[in-house]
Image (cartoon, rainbow, N blue to C red):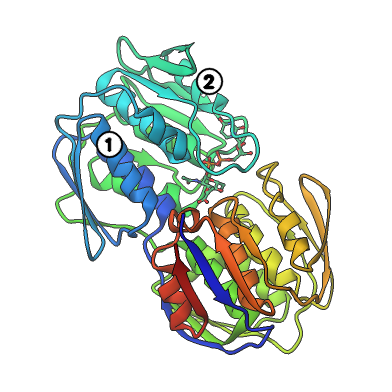
């Protein structure tokens, strides 16, 4: 697999320029899944050219849809003949977001067979919320040879599903499935992420009667859906944007992040301000730079609108450069501090107390190393660590970073970092 070779800046805040943010990975994937329940051609714009989008097209093609990605970020999906009911096992095991297709295939074709979805190893990633929810909507669920089959013989019944914990993809999966149910569906304790709201917007533009997205209770009335006439624009990626904001606080002389929704980044912006990072907010831009000293802080990940777990690892890199003791409490996933060992090998003073808590003491200079990113976000964090370090690092598993970040080496070199992709 490819790797990135990065010349560290030894903590010098010299990066400057503008970086344009792509459409959101975690918004486009559920919208692509939702396109499946319709007959006709769905067109999407502002779609990032990332590996996960191409995997989702392949998964859709595996059940009989036809999809294309055109340069410039448009996707077209033709789904009328998508009568397949079995998700490609190898692909579904690589991509957690494949689980989004379970609701769509079930709603369209009455049954779906799929493996336990794979994806980033962030700890245990169960699917009980999905299986319980399907049962509550009148489906039968069976498991054989590590494959699940969910069947709705007479269509999905209406009713209500209360999620034990707010899950982003479970909320989205049931929003998609519910548009074809026999009666209204009420979802409670829903995730409130902007990507959930974006999916509701897409469904509403396609004719769905749906209310409450962005609050804990979402109500979906069954309706006939047709793809919107105009291409549907994907919202900006708040995690890509947030990663560059953190880079700006770490090494920015002045970095402007463009084409974003600053209102989707409030928890990060408030945290950076509490650390005395200068953050200048425009309509669709944020400008950020490294302050003379960074103040310590406690970061506690939380469902939206709290601090995103997907920015926890990038933020940890910044905390290694802070004067004093900071703490990180990871409340969403139990394996999301596993990358810390490698960071410690680079010279960071981070002590992990338990799978959910780490104490960081700084500032510590980081030494260049050859390391592999374990998941998309920790991979990006290692690029930040390599950028601030002394010497040349090699960050392996570039393909993992490519799953979430388009043209990352181009964007970082555009800001003045010496980075290249090698085989
Ligand atoms: N959970 C269960 N049972 C389930 C499903 C989830 O216990 O059936 C738990 C999880 O173990 C976790 C919590 O619920 O403790 C919340 O996880 P959630 O289901 O919300 O995560 P997800 O839907 O699998 C999405 C993003 C992740 C992001 C999380 C949290 C997509 C495709 N993925 O995952 O993004 O970290 O929400 O915000 O939207 C990434 O982009 O790199 C990424 C991992």
Quarter location, residue 305: bottom right
Foreground label between 2 and 1: 1
Mark 2 within 8 Å of ligand 1, using the beta carbon: yes
Residue drawn at point x = 34 percent, y = 27 percent: 87
Is residue 66 at least partly visible in the picture?
Answer: yes
Q: Between 318 and 109, which is closer to the camera in this rendering? A: 318
Proximity of marks 2 and 1: CB atoms separated by less than 8 Å? no
Secondary structure under badge 1?
Answer: helix
Residue drawn at point x = 44 percent, y = 53 percent: 403
Horizontal arrangement in the rendering, residue 243 relative to residue 225 (left or right)? right
Q: Quadrant of ligand 1?
A: top right
- Where does the image place residue 350, in percent across and percent down from the top left? 81, 61
Horizontal arrangement in the rendering, residue 199 relative to residue 371 (left or right)? left
Looking at the image, how many numbered discs can be counted on the residues?
Answer: 2
**Measured along the vertical axis of the image, is residue 63 above or below residue 408?**
above
Secondary structure under badge 2?
Answer: helix
Point out the image quarter for the C terminus. bottom left
Horizontal arrangement in the rendering, residue 348 relative to residue 64 (left or right)? right
Residue receiving disc 1: 60
**Measured along the vertical axis of the image, is residue 86 above or below residue 230?**
above
Q: Between 386 and 280, which is closer to the camera in this rendering? A: 386
Residue drawn at point x = 65 percent, y = 39 percent: 123
Q: Between 5 and 29, which is closer to the camera in this rendering? A: 5
- Where does the image place residue 337, in percent across and percent down from the top left? 71, 51
Point out the residue furthest to the front here.
Answer: 423
Residue receiving disc 2: 132
**Measured along the vertical axis of the image, is residue 183 above or below residue 209?**
above
Horizontal arrangement in the rendering, residue 13 relative to residue 330 (left or right)? left
Please rate how many residues cluster around mark 2, counting C-alpha atoms within 10 Å: few if below 14, some from 14 to 19, many from 20: some
């Amino acid at each position: 697999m490819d790797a990135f070779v990065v010349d560290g800046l030894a903590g010098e805040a010299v990066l400057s320029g503008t970086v344009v943010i792509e459409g959101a990975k975690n918004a486009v994937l559920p919208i692509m899944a939702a396109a499946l329940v319709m007959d006709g051609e769905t067109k999407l714009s502002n779609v990032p050219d990332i590996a996960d989008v191409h995997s989702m097209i392949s998964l859709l093609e595996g059940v009989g849809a036809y999809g294309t990605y055109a340069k410039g970020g448009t996707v077209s999906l033709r789904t009328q003949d998508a009568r397949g009911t079995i998700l490609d096992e190898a692909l579904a095991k690589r991509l957690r977001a494949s689980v989004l297709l379970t609701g769509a295939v079930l709603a369209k074709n009455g049954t779906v067979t799929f493996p336990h979805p794979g994806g980033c190893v962030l700890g245990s990633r169960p699917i009980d919320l999905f299986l319980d929810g399907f049962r509550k909507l009148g489906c039968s669920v069976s498991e054989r040879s590590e494959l699940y089959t969910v069947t709705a013989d007479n269509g999905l019944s209406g009713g209500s599903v209360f999620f034990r914990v707010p899950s982003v993809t479970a909320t989205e999966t049931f929003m998609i499935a519910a548009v074809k149910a026999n009666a209204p569906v009420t979802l409670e304790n829903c995730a409130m992420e902007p990507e959930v709201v974006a999916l509701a917007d897409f469904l509403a533009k396609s004719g769905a009667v749906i209310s409450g997205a962005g609050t804990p209770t979402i109500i979906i009335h069954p309706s006939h859906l047709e793809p919107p006439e105009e291409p549907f624009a994907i919202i900006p990626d708040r995690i890509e944007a947030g990663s560059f904001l953190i880079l700006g606080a770490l090494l920015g002389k002045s970095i402007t992040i463009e084409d974003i929704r600053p209102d989707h980044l409030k928890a990060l912006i408030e945290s950076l301000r509490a650390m005395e990072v200068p953050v200048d907010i425009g309509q669709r831009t944020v400008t950020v730079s490294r302050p003379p000293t960074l103040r310590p802080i406690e970061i506690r990940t939380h469902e939206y609108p709290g601090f995103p777990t997907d920015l926890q690892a990038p933020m940890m890199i910044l905390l290694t450069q802070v004067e004093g003791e900071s703490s990180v409490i990871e409340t969403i996933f139990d394996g999301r501090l596993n990358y810390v060992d490698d960071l410690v090998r680079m010279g960071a003073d981070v002590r992990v107390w338990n799978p959910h808590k780490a104490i960081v003491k700084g500032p510590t200079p980081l030494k260049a190393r050859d390391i592999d990113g374990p998941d998309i976000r920790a991979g990006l964090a290692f690029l930040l660590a390599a950028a601030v370090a002394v010497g040349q690092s090699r960050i392996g598993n570039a393909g993992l970073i490519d799953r979430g970040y388009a043209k990352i080496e181009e964007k970082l070199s555009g800001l003045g970092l010496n980075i290249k992709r090698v085989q």
